[in-house]
Image (cartoon, helix red, strand yellow):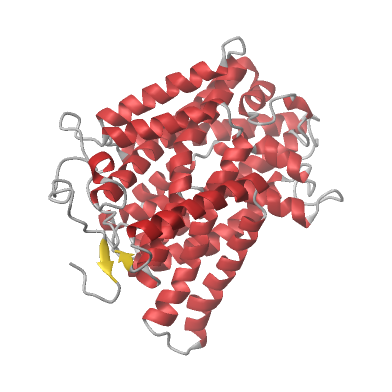
Amino acid sequence: MWAIVGLGLGYMTPTVVFDTFGIVSEITDGTVPMAYLVALVVMLFTAISYGKMAGEIPSAGSAYTYVRESMHPNLGFMVGWTSLLDYILLPMVNALIIRLYMEQMFPTVPPWIWVVLYCIAVTAIVAFSMRGTSNFNALLLSFAVIVILVFIGLVVQQVLAGEGLATLASTRPFVHEGLNSQSLLMAATVVCFSFIGFDAITMYAEEAKDAKTMPRAILLTVLIGGAIFFVASYFAQLRFPDNTPFGEFTDDPLPQIGLIVGGQVFQVIFVAAGFTATLASGLASHASVSRMLLVMGRNNVFPRKWFGRINPTSHTPVFNVVLVGIVSLLAIEFSLELISAFINFGALIAFSFVNASVIAYFAWRKGLRKTGRDIFKYIVMPGIGLVLTLLLWLNLHTEALIGGGIWLAAGLVYLAVITKGFRKKVVGFDEAQPVTGFNKVADAPDDEDPVLEVEGAEPK
């Protein structure tokens, strides 16, 4: 269980709290911890729903799997399509964060160079090997947590010496006259980006030794990750009540925070912690989306000729890996606030449908017993989670809603094409397929169509 929790926390990247600190502090006028509390409540309801579905369907899966099994395969496809947006953009946002670090550390070097170098390096590593170890992840996670603890220690000394709010106990980071509910919801939507990744551990459901392991691991990942974000943001807010010390670097103030709190030596250590955590997350997300595209290609959701093939030398889906690397180059231009909003568009839709899938699966598919306990567990709890996630989704960046809406429309058109005008339904692809080597599906003739079945007919 703790190995799975560690993988989830590594995917979430603990240092990301400092990357978005300036953006959220500006939106809320200095109440970042309160935004994290609101987001944590929403994520806890969703995590409980993920746990219920993972315990009931103990195969490697995701929001796509749960919607497919509880509602309809075609609706599941649309949820998977929407999730694909944040899967594809996660490697790009890691490249963007690295760019923001490097342009502050080396201001004379053109920022695009760092993006190109990063994308080439990560693409090459993933193209040659998609394997990773939980031990390496644990090492990187431990380093990040230790550096955060050192940061808190330094902040305590400086606050007691009169810096920042000059007190360790203050309600200012939670509530003040300038805070309003609209700003708080917008900020909570932004910090949801920090929690992205806790749902990825459902992919390890088949490795769990006990059926109860996965629900507990999901809940613990959100609780521990939320605690790290909350505590770190609270002490950062005590030291930096506003964004004035960051100057022009509010888009990602992590390097400036390290420099102001601990000088140049600590700045290097602080950036190194953020860099390694971001790199680990970048490698994991790059491999994950490449794997997802491979499985979709093998099942003819996407053209198998391109997406479903494995390189005979590296035994990895090189086309998919390079494609994700090319998309990541867009980090040269975009801002962290906008890209995180696009990622949250897909993630919050997926979270909403996981909450809805609990109601559909237990109250409709299985037939809910009419007891107060069951109604509370399988209707009231996920219902609250559904309302909260939709509320955050409605407070997304306008550009993200427009761009995400276009992505959704494209997916609907594509679904209409591959299902022959919705007369067929998508038979779920197997997310548990291996990411390396060869199998019968990958080697099947291209004219076979294992993805579709006629509505109402038995699967092939």
Q: Nearer the viewer, residue 243 or 122?
A: 122
Q: Nearer the viewer, residue 163 or 98?
A: 98
**Exactly how many numbered labels are in the figure?**
0
Q: Name above or below for residue 320 compared with residue 100.
A: below
> What is the x, y in percent for residue 303?
28, 46
> What is the x, y in percent for residue 373?
50, 83
> What is the x, y in percent for residue 113?
50, 16
Left or right? Give the position of 96 relative to 454: right
Res 432 → quadrant: bottom left
- Identify the residue shown where x is 48% and y is 58%: 350
Outermost residue toward the right in this view: 177
Position of the N terminus, as image quadrant, is bottom left
Q: Name above or below for residue 62 compared with residue 278.
A: below
Outermost residue toward the top in this view: 108
Q: Name above or below for residue 313 compared with residue 227.
A: above
Q: Nearer the viewer, residue 409 or 197?
A: 409
Q: Is residue 273 visible?
A: no
- Identify the residue shown where x is 78% and y is 35%: 242
Q: Is residue 439 visible?
A: yes
- Identify the residue shown where x is 62% and y is 19%: 104
Left or right? Give the position of 138 relative to 49: left
Position of the C terminus, as image quadrant, is bottom left
- Identify the residue shown where x is 39% and y is 45%: 7
